[in-house]
Image: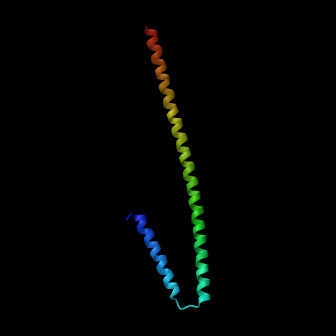
Amino acid sequence: MDKKGIWIAFGVGVAAGAAVALLYAPETGADMRNRLRGNIDDGVESLSQTATYLKEQADTLSKQAQAFVERTRGQVQGVIDATTGVVTSATKGVQSLM
C-alpha cells in the first residue's frame, strides 16, 4: 500500500473511532446531535477553506507555468533567429564562392 493509501486508511480509522466514541459518550441524544451537527459544520467550513486555498495555489502554479512557457518560447525563438542568421550568412558565402 502506498503512503497516500495508508494516510487515507488512517484517516478513515480515526473518523470511525471518533464516531464510535461519540455514540458511546454519556450525553443525551439531543446534546449529542447538536455536538455532531456543530462538528459537521466545522468540517464543512474546513473543507471549504481548504478547497479555496487549493484553487488559489492551482491558479498561482498555472500562472507560473504560463510565464515559464513564454520565457522558454522567447529563448527558443532567439536560438532559431540566430541559427537562421548563421545559415543565411553561410548560404550567401557559399553562393559568392560559386
The residue lying furthest to the top in this view is 98
Task: Tell me what residue is drawn at x 53 percent, y 37 percent.
Answer: 73
- Using the image as rendered, state which of residue 46 and residue 31 is in the foreground: 31
- Using the image as rendered, state which of residue 92 and residue 23 is in the foreground: 23
- Using the image as rendered, state which of residue 84 and residue 31 is in the foreground: 31
Task: Tell me what residue is drawn at x 46 percent, y 76 percent.
Answer: 14
Quadrant occupied by the N terminus: bottom left
Q: Is residue 20 above or below residue 69?
A: below
Position of residue 93 in the picture relative to residue 32 (left or right): left
Q: Is residue 2 above or below residue 42?
A: above
Q: Is residue 45 above or below residue 53?
A: below
Give the image location of residue 4, x and y in percent: 43, 64
Give the image location of residue 79, x and y in percent: 48, 31
Q: Is residue 39 above or below residue 63?
A: below
Position of residue 3 in the picture relative to residue 29 (left or right): left
- Using the image as rendered, state which of residue 15 and residue 98 is in the foreground: 15
Colour mapping: rainbow
Give the image location of residue 69, x and y in percent: 53, 42
Task: Tell me what residue is drawn at x 61 percent, y 79 percent.
Answer: 38
Quadrant occupied by the C terminus: top left
